[in-house]
Image (spheres, grey):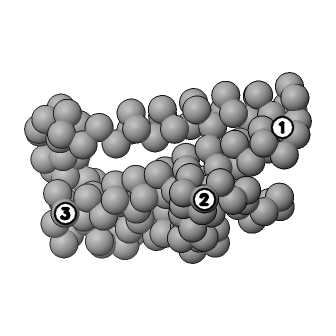
Amino acid sequence: MPSLPEPAHVIADDTEALKVAEALKVAEALTEEFRTGAAERDARRRLPRAEEALLSAAARAVDTARGRLDAATAAEASIAVAAAKVAAANAAVETGSSLFEVSGTRSALDALGLHRHWRDARTHTLHDPARWKVQHIGRYVLNGTKPPRHGLL
């Protein structure tokens, strides 16, 4: 029988328990504040729908390329995937930044751990830079120049 995973952290004393309780109260307040007006913000931004549409288009392009792989279908698939990646990266960083905007400076407390969402999103955008993808997308759309055929796009 597999053993249960060990807890990530054991609260050492009452002082630490009080700090955790305070952090949870802050998180609950921030959640409620963020929830208020969420439907209106979603209606204005429409970010998730745009990324979902680009991802669906990229999936269709990849399926088409798999069905009849040639230089044209490979280029279409590469560009579609790059466009989805750029949009998703921008949305991830913007969403992480918006978290801080709506929740104020207390949201950056280490005890809450909310800063990691922005940091993780930003790290992913730096490891796979969108600015190179945008250049290849532009060259393809404007000049018909096919993107390079390697995993970096």
Disc 3 or disc 1, which is closer to the eye? 3
Does residue 43 sit above or below 119 in this rendering?
A: above
Separation of disc 3 and disc 1 at Cα? 43 Å
Which class describes the residues within 10 Å of circle 2: few (<14), some (14-19), or many (20+)? few
**Of pointers 1 and 2, the one earlier in the residue sequence:** 1
Q: Residue at x 24, y 43 (%)?
A: 45
Horizontal side of residue 24 vs 142, given as left or right: left
Q: Position of residue 83 (x, y in %)?
A: 55, 50
Which class describes the residues within 10 Å of circle 1: few (<14), some (14-19), or many (20+)? few
- The residue beneath circle 1 is 2
**Of pointers 3 and 1, the one earlier in the residue sequence:** 1
Assign a secondary structure to mark 3. Answer: helix
Q: Position of residue 133 (x, y in %)?
A: 60, 63
Q: Residue at x 78, y 63 (%)?
A: 148
Residue kind at label 3, given as amino acid type: Glu
Does residue 117 sit above or below 47 in this rendering?
A: below
Residue 101 got which mark? 3
**Of pointers 3 and 2, the one earlier in the residue sequence:** 3
- Where, quadrant-wise, is the C terminus in this rendering? bottom right
- The residue beneath circle 2 is 143
Q: Residue at x 23, y 37 (%)?
A: 42
Separation of disc 1 and disc 2 at Cα? 58 Å
